[in-house]
Image (spheres, grey):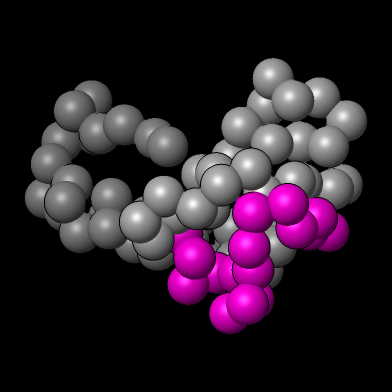
Amino acid sequence: MRLVVDRIEEEIAVCYLYEDDRVRFDIPLRYLPPDVVAGDHLRVRFELDRESRERERRRAEELLRELTRGQPDEKRFEL
């Protein structure tokens, strides 16, 4: 996927999807190469992070167990 940097506003790069300029992304400059300027094209790739998702699920389940410890079964809920 490609983005086009339309402009820089303070610390935000206002970008549009190259293939569809109706799709806008406002990206903090700290996440972009240091020399990015208006008119630059950026390649973007999304990846699934299943390990992170599983860690967060386990963390949420543990928190739920802590919050419902000692509660009657009928008052418990599931994620």
The answer to whether residue 44 is visible is no
Does the segment drawn in magenta span residue 7?
no
Q: Quadrant location of residue 79?
A: top left
Q: Is residue 58 above or below residue 26?
A: below
Please tell me which residue lies in front, 61 or 48. 48
Q: Quadrant location of residue 61?
A: bottom left
Q: Position of residue 73 (x, y in %)?
A: 24, 34
Q: Is residue 3 above or below residue 16?
A: below
Q: Quadrant location of residue 32?
A: bottom right
Q: Position of residue 77 (x, y in %)?
A: 31, 31
Q: Is residue 26 above or below residue 61?
A: above
Name of the residue lying farthest toward the top? 22
Please tell me which residue lies in front, 56 or 65. 56
Q: Which residues are magenta?
A: 27-45
The answer to whether residue 10 is visible is yes
The residue under the point 39% across, 35% down is 78
Q: Position of residue 1 (x, y in %)?
A: 87, 47
**Lateral position of residue 65 relative to residue 26, left or right:** left
